[in-house]
Image (spheres, rainbow, N blue to C red):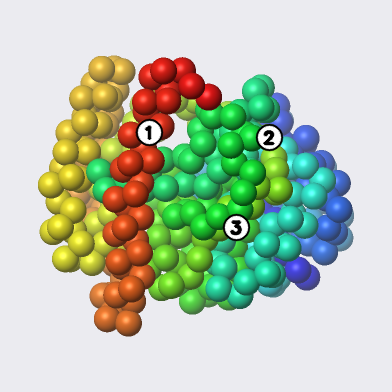
Amino acid sequence: MKATVIIPNLNGAGWLRDSIESIWQQTEQDFELIVVDNGSTDESLAIARSYQGHPRYTLIENAENTGFSHAVNQGIALAKSEYVALFNNDAFAEPTWLAELLRTADADPRIFAVSSLMLRYYEPHLADDAGDYVTILGFACKRGDGLRAERYTKPCRVFSACGGAALYRKAVLDEIGTFDENFFAYYEDVDLSWRANNRGWRNVYCPTARCRHICGATTGAVRYNPFKSIQSGRNSILLPYKNQPLLMLVLNFVPMLLGYLLKVVMFRLRGFGNDYAKGFHEAWIALPKLDKPRFRWRNLPNYLWVECSLIAGLFRYLVYRVQRALKIT
C-alpha cells in the first residue's frame, strides 16, 4: 500500500461525507482510508459507519474527544503504508490531490512532509494555507492566509506542513516520533515538522496538491473563541521550549517575550485575555511532561537553518500584516 489517508472527525455531519467522497475519487487509488471518530454526538458517526465493509476502509471509534494528536496517532499506528496523509473532515480534495503529494515526496528521499495548497471553501480564489512558518516572536502562522492563491504557484521548502492536508513519510515518523499528545489541538503539526527540521529532513509545499477547506468548522474557531485561545496560549509556550536548544532559547528570549506580550494585548482586545492566560497556566503544568529532544552537535547546521527561518519568518509576518492592513490580497 502506497499511502494511508487519515481523517479525524468530531461532529462533522455537515461535511464529512463530501470529504470522504473526495478521497475515494482520487486518481491515485493505492491507498487505504482510516476515519477516527472522536466521540461524535451528531449524525457524522452514522456517516462514518456507512462506509464499513469497504475493503480499504477502517473506522476507529473513540468514546470521547481525545484531541487531534491522539486521534491521528491511532490511525498512524495502524498504517502499513510508505506514506501517511492527514486530511481534515472539513476539507475537500481535488482528484489529483494525493497523486501530486506522492509525486513530490517520491522525487526526493530527504523530504519528510508535503504541504498542500488549501483554498478557502467560500472564496476559492484565496489561499487558506500554503505551508506554515514560525517567527522569532514565537508566532506560528499560516502562509498565504487570505491572499490570492495565484501568488503560491511555485513549489518551495517551508518550515512546516499544515496537518489539515499533508503527506508524511512513515519511516521518518518511526524515527522522530508521531504527534505529541501534549498538544491537544493546534501547533501539533508545527511541532512535528520542527522536530524533522532539527534532524535535517525537509518539509515542502506542493501547489498542485489542492483542496478546499472550511476553516474552523470542527472547532467553531474561524478566528478566535475560548477553546482556541486557551490552546494558543498553552501551545505557544510548549512549541519553542520543546524544540529550541538551550542556547537558542537564551538568544531568542527577548523577542519571544515581546511576542507573548503582544499576544496578551491582542487577545485582551478581542475579549479572550482570560482564556489566553489560562493557556499560559496550563503550559507550566505541561512543560515537565514534554519529551524535549537532546541537543546533538551533528544537528548544528539544522539548528542554524531553523534560527534563520525564525528571523525570516518575522519579516514575512510583518509584510503580511501590512498587506492585511491595506487590504491587499
Q: Amino acid at mark 1?
A: Val
Residue 51 placement, left or right of 141: right
Q: Amino acid at mark 2?
A: Arg
Q: Position of residue 133 (x, y in %)?
A: 42, 48
Query: Marks 3 and 2: in contact by CB < 8 Å?
Result: no
Q: Residue furthest bottom?
A: 298
Q: Amino acid at mark 3?
A: Val
Callout count? 3
Give the CA distance from mark 3 to mark 1.
25 Å
Q: For the residue labelled by badge 1, is the local secondary structure a helix, a strand or a loop?
A: helix
* Residue drawn at 65 percent across, 47 percent down: 207
Closer to the camera, 227 or 127? 127
Closer to the camera, 327 or 110? 327
Placement of 299 over or under 16, stated as above or below: below
Q: Position of residue 189 (x, y in %)?
A: 47, 52
Q: Compare marks 1 and 2 and give the one earlier in the sequence.
A: 2
Q: For the residue labelled by badge 2, is the local secondary structure a helix, a strand or a loop?
A: strand
* Residue drawn at 26 percent across, 24 percent down: 266
Residue matched to label 2: 212
Placement of 111 over or under 72, stated as above or below: below
Closer to the camera, 11 or 79? 79
Placement of 276 over or under 22, stated as above or below: above
Give the CA distance from mark 2 to mark 3.
17 Å
Residue matched to label 3: 114
Q: For the residue labelled by badge 3, is the local secondary structure a helix, a strand or a loop?
A: strand
Query: Marks 1 and 3: in contact by CB < 8 Å?
Result: no
Give the CA distance from mark 1 to mark 2.
25 Å
Residue 207 placement, left or right of 174: right
Q: Which mark is residue 145?
A: none
Closer to the camera, 283 or 144? 144
* Residue drawn at 40 percent across, 60 percent down: 194
Residue matched to label 1: 319
